Amino acid sequence: MRETITENLAIPVIGNYDVIVCGGGIGGLAAAVSASRLGASVLLVEKSITLGGLATLGLISWYEPICDGRGKKVMFGVADELLHLAIQYGPNTLPDAWTGNPSLADTDKRFATYFSPTLFSLALDEWLTGSGVKLLLDTWVSVPVMATRHCKGVIVENKTGRGCYLAKVVIDATGDADILYRAGVPCICGKNYLTFIAYASTVETCESAVQSRNILQSRRWLTIGSDLWGNGHPKQMRLLTGVTAEDVTEYVMQGRKLLLERLKIDPPAQRDLSALPGMAQFRTTRRIVGAYELTDADEGSHLEDSIGVAVDFAHPGRWYELPYRILYNTDYDNLLTAGRSVSAAGWAWDVTRVIPVSATTGQAAGVAAALSARQNVVLGELDAKLIQDEMLQSGVKLHMS
């Protein structure tokens, strides 16, 4: 039997909010700002000192498509807003046909772009600062405070010490459903190939940047390990869930080891790393079992409580409507999630984990949280049409047909 200790601590209650958002990645940011825009008092807690999650700290600086691949823009609202914020202060690779943000374009090129993760993170700082959201950086949400299946708030740890914040609604945007899992919400874990991405600069990339006068050319993605489909995954290495300290450590250390082995091939004076990821670049770690599970069978289907449409980044012409029910479990009345931890399985999980879809589910979670707090209605009884009305007002497309 494992040895244990027992704590008996008096933890100060520091604040009380309508909505607490745990995690400052794309989904969490979208949730926090969207809730604040509806008048809710919002606390956003981020464990690092950089907003944006995988898009910035994780160096995944590719804003996936918001069009259907056939010249029709499909994703609007905060997903559209953040795409343009990502390139507001830095370079981009947006196809000419999509310049000016048209709804239709005579092209089969996707409405997608590379961006500078560092400049995007600074733009996110500015965006959040003007939103009215209270932000805590370098702060870890450690424990949800539960009264049976109702979450009263969260306990945090930071430089100040340990403290408690109370809330009417809590949104888990950690990317791993950490808070909902600790609250008891049923969850399912994924399995991840090792993919490790760093930014490399060489004499050739620098020459290309000078010749093209495009700073993006000065670096390139240096990808180690597997592609999306498992090709290149290191032999003898197990697939990792990413929900234990051991998994995260193995993923990062093995990725960096293989990266160094690759760099040893090149002459030292002719290459350098311009950036290493500041977080593990997992794709699918842990997601909730929601009131509805989005699956591959839902592709192209009409779902009555849809809060937005997600396009398939890998398969032009394919799309999914995103039902409100994938954001919560019916047994927990004030807990929501957004981003890659929504209730989705199979390829639908891959579709829902990417940047623009995380922004859409985050926006919907923020709207739902604000409405629930305002009306004092539990999430499972909140009229989805009220959420849809707010999403429509921001320009979001709810249905494809």
Image: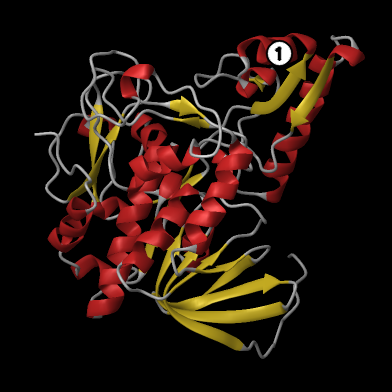
Q: Residue at x 79, y 11 (%)?
A: 203
Corner quadrant of residue 76? top left
**Placement of the N terminus among the 4 image quadrants:** bottom right
**Closer-to-camera residue (356/145):** 356
Q: Which residue is mark 1?
A: 205
Q: Is residue 135 visible?
A: yes
Residue 157, image x and y in percent?
Answer: 68, 72
Corner quadrant of residue 19? bottom left
Q: Is residue 79 above or below residue 149?
A: above
Amino acid type at image mark 1: Thr
Q: Residue at x 30, y 55 (%)?
A: 364
Q: Is residue 88 above or below residue 389?
A: above
**Placement of the C terminus among the 4 image quadrants:** top left
Q: Is residue 343 visible?
A: no
> What SS does tag 1 mark?
helix
**Closer-to-camera residue (319/254):** 319
Q: Residue at x 73, y 78 (%)?
A: 161
**Closer-to-camera residue (395/31):** 395
Q: Residue at x 61, y 22 (%)?
A: 216
Residue 246, image x and y in percent?
Answer: 72, 45
241 relative position to 308: left or right: right
